[in-house]
Image: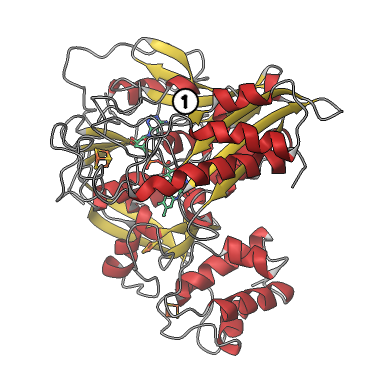
Amino acid sequence: MVAPESSYGEESVPPTSGAAPAVEPHTIRSVDVDLTINGAQHRLASLDVNATLLDCLRDALHLTGTKKGCGLGQCGACTVLVDGRRVNACLCLAVMQQGKQITTIEGIGIEGDLHVLQSAFIRHDAFQCGYCTSGQIMSGLACIHEGHTRSDDEVREWMSGNLCRCGAYTNIVAAVREAAQGSVAK
Amino acid sequence: MTPFTYAKPESVAQAVRSGAGHQSDAKSSALDFFAGGTDMVQLMQERVRNPEHVVDITGLPQLDRIEVGEQSTRLGALVRMSDAASHPHIVEVFPVVAEALLASASPQVRNLATLGGNLLQRTRCGYFRDVVTPCNKRIPGSGCPAIDGQNRGLAILGTSQRCIATYAGDFANALMVLDASVLIAGSAGLRTVALADLHRQPGDTPHLETHLQPGELIVAIELPHLAVGLRSHYLKVRDRTSFAFALASVAVGLDMASDGTVRDARIAVGGVATTPWRLPRVEQALRGHKLDAELCRAASALASADAVPHGQNAFKVTLLERVVARGLEETGGLA
Ligand SMILES: Cc1cc2nc3c(=O)[nH]c(=O)nc-3n(C[C@H](O)[C@H](O)[C@H](O)COP(=O)(O)OP(=O)(O)OC[C@H]3O[C@@H](n4cnc5c(N)ncnc54)[C@H](O)[C@@H]3O)c2cc1C
Ligand code: SF4
Ligand code: FES
Ligand code: FES
């Protein structure tokens, strides 16, 4: 309803009419959402707009590899890649992820053909209960691609968004560093 | 999360017309802007904010850019924390900004969170975020259980009888030493506000946290190039090495002559005050003197001159002085 503007800097903004804030007429409470996950298209019919990406992945699409720990951005268990960047799926609204490439743990390797980093986690015994592991691996992948693996301390700092209540940290750092030195070209 | 309706405006004018706000009390604005969502989703999941309508501003054009001009650098409000922190010009010219951003939250959160949203993040006071307790900020007039309660993380500077909540952000403290300003779009057009004038001290109205009016949108943050040449640095002390809010932090900007004399000093602290907080007395004590360990110690002793401790947070008085001293030494090349 408003013409696209060329620059936010110079545009004049028309005043609001009256006291009541004008809610735009095209507001929605639920909507069909199209998500691209691990290269595949998924349609979620009339999804509530308050659904998080995490709940959508787990409850609607049954991609339960992504875990829910805190639901508040504090633990990293829900880490996925959106357009190649690691984010907390619990802090994202699903409706805002349309048109983006979402990668979850299910998308990086399969039994018999694991990702280098998955194999490194197994080789280094980088987990006990495994609850944090898919988030650690997704975060570790991004950490490697970002190039933050030059020392153990650097890995610790850049993996600090992923908590492990079992305390497998030492082995997680070792697995991430080993995978960083090998090929992660997958 | 309480259900809400959702709209994604395509222009700043449309977003402003929505009238969405950012007050902290549970009742006022039923319309909230939503950018990275990292604080909004937390607040909505814990029912601290229950907007009826959410205005997603991430589709607004051109607000995700960093523009390096002649006089200033302009950071769009939708620039993600991670992108600002790794921008070569920011890293080189405004290290205090890059360091403050990298000391904030986690890589995942920084990939989502925007600079505009960062400035407006809510306090981490546990009572504010627990809806079953009273809190003057959330429910004006209901009382402040923190003053005689769990206040280890809360403020010692800028407090009132009604609220002692800490301003939790790091980025704003770095901006304070650079004399940054904020460009705001509202129904009457654009206005510029010094960052130092964006936040309000709690006083008798702790639910009013900023001077933004309903519908007003932060569109950019402006860093004047006057501050170029300043040595700057951010030091943050936390309960753990990484991924935690500050117990005390300091942003330092020093303009030093070649013989070590301080021509100008700008110092702001975090984790200890109710808003981003400059320390003019410490700055004054440094100006015109040669920076050495003794001067750092003497000047930083003035940091807590106005401090009002509240029991559990009394340790912050000494911690603040030491963090300021250490920050000065590190910036001045003494440590
Ligand atoms: C686990 C965790 C740890 C954290 N640790 C730290 C830390 O150590 N240091 C630190 O500084 N921060 C920390 N944060 C806070 C984080 O940096 C902020 O939540 C984030 O920067 C907010 O940005 P956003 O884009 O996600 O804002 P949103 O959550 O989208 O919005 C925040 C508020 O700002 C309003 N808003 C957003 N953009 C605009 C705009 N352009 N104009 C007007 N209003 C707007 C919204 O209405 C809302 O009220 C942490 C957050 C989490 C989740
Ligand atoms: S300190 Fe402020 S935010 Fe915390 S309980 Fe008191 S009034 Fe609420
Ligand atoms: S579930 Fe998302 S960070 Fe904990
Ligand atoms: S392996 Fe159990 S939480 Fe990390």
Q: Quadrant location of residue B179?
A: top right
Furthest toward the right, the residue is B258
The reply to whether the residue tagged 1 has its Cβ within 8 angstroms of ligand 1 is yes
What is the x, y in percent for residue B154? 36, 44
User: Is B132 situated left or right of A92 in this image?
Assistant: left
Residue A137 sits above or below residue B280 on the image = below
What is the x, y in percent for residue B226? 69, 19
Question: Which residue is at the front of the view, B46 or A82?
Answer: B46
Residue B273 sits above or below residue B149 on the image = above
Report whether residue A140 is seen: yes
Residue drawn where x is 68% and y is 16% of the image? B71
The crowd level at tag 1 (other Cα within 10 Å; few <14, some 14-19, many 20+) is many
Q: Quadrant of ligand 4?
A: bottom left
Circle 1: residue type: Val
How many numbered circles are shown?
A: 1
User: Is B181 situated left or right of A182 in this image?
Assistant: left
What is the x, y in percent for residue B103? 56, 49
Question: Which residue is at the front of the view, B86 or B280?
Answer: B280
Question: Which residue is at the front of the view, A61 or B332?
Answer: B332
Tell which subunit mark 1 falls on. Answer: B
Question: Which residue is at the front of the view, B86 or A14?
Answer: B86
What is the x, y in percent for residue B108? 49, 56
Q: Quadrant location of residue B60?
A: top left
- Please tell me whether mark 1 sits on a helix, a strand or a loop: strand
Q: Which residue is mark 1?
A: B219
Residue B115 sits above or below residue B13 on the image = below
